[in-house]
Amino acid sequence: MKKRWQAKALGEILQKTETVNPLSSPQTEFDYIDVSSVSNTTFQIETTQRLKGKNAPSRARKLVRMNDILFATIRPTLQRIAIVPENLDKQVCSTGYFVLRPNAGIDHRFVFYFLFTEDFTKQMTSLQKGASYPAVTDGDVRAQMIPVPPLAEQQRIVGLLDEAFAGIATAQSNAEKNLQNTRALFDSHLQSVFTQRGKGWTEKTIGECFRVRSGDFLPVRAMVDSGDIDVYGGNGVNGKHDKKNLTGENIIIGRVGAKCGNVRYVNGDLWVTDNAIFISEYFCPFNLKFLTRLLEHKDLRNRANQMAQPVISYTTIKDVLLEFPVSKDKQKEIADKLDTMEEETQRLASVYEQKLTTLGELKRSLLHQAFTGNL
């Protein structure tokens, strides 16, 4: 630690905060900051509820002041952290927050940035308790050690981090927009392929094009780690087996489950369980990669029976209209173009995802340097 820096527990540098009971003033209105009010993307209080005291939930008990820092102790690794703005001065937040109000001589934004450091996050991860709602206590947060330089040094570090993080936020926003635009461009092209059809296209129902049947029951205990044959169920590949019940080019469709209606082209040996269906008989000539794209476009999940869990069957999908070129050569040409475009889309998406990862690592590095005295 640098000279003139001191290691202190957070509790040593914080003022005592107030609690209130809005029920004691039933007609008085206040803005309520619930745990869901804070965004863990923008790290701001984005929504509040305007309530009368008589309608206050039991958790509405902590008074907040401008420049207080809110740290959600429920699921602390989600980093729902924000600074109270002027317009929410003297309002009320949930007991699901620990309210940090720094003493004189402590820059509130210095404390705010500390809560994002890797060391602090690791401590919260190790201390959280509970399965459904993992949480830490206010005391856990107070006990964490923070390196404290003189106020002027705190302010210098905060100024550098503010400037750097503003630039990073802009770069992240641009990368996220480019990522969304890349995917949207492919989706738009895919949509146009099946809506702007030309000569040589026909329209038939699934029932007129092919027939499907269910796969075969396979108990979980029958799956073997040493097998080299993929087992396809309602959600895609869910295990390995040493036997096959299907081979060659096939289209597999999830029949039941969260991803019911998902469509996969498979070429090779596989085992299809009774949680999936496959095309067993064709009445029209199809390039199977093209047909896979077409069925994905039709979003067969929308045809599921809404039971305890969604289920599709031949009965629910047989009337779905399919538009396609009669020529298998034309189908293959379209499928090949879509494959090429998807590969390029994935390449660009990977570039933008890597940029976002790099920016996140840069933020972590800057925070580490800031709180070790190397910034």
Image (spheres, rainbow, N blue to C red):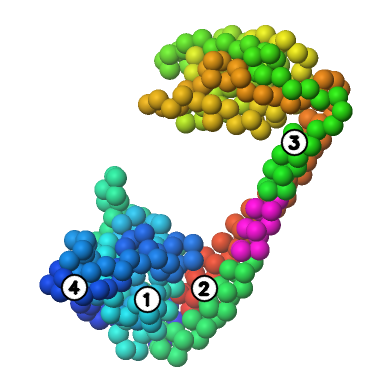
Residue under numbered circle 1: 84
Residues shaded magenta: 172-182
Residue type pointed to by label 4: Gln
Q: Are marks 2 and 1 in contact (CB under 8 Å)?
A: no
Residue under numbered circle 4: 27
Please determine whether, in this image, residue 158 is positioned above or below residue 228. Answer: below
**For residue 180: magenta?**
yes
Residue drawn 52% across the image and 73% down it:
369
Chain-order first, disc 2 or disc 1? 1
Question: Which quadrant is home to the C terminus?
Answer: bottom right
Q: Nearer the viewer, residue 36 or 126?
A: 36
Can residue 234 be seen at all in this image of the molecule? no
Neighbourhood count class around disc 3 (C-alpha, 10 Å): few under 14, some 14–19, many 20 upward:
few
**Viewer-side label of 2, 4:** 4
Residue under numbered circle 2: 369
Residue under numbered circle 3: 195
The span from disc 2 to disc 1 (Cα, nearest Å) is 26 Å
User: Element under label 1?
Assistant: loop
Q: Residue furthest left?
A: 24
Q: Are marks 3 and 1 in contact (CB under 8 Å)?
A: no
Determine which quarter of the picture holds residue 137: bottom left
The span from disc 3 to disc 4 (Cα, nearest Å) is 58 Å
Q: Are marks 4 and 1 in contact (CB under 8 Å)?
A: no
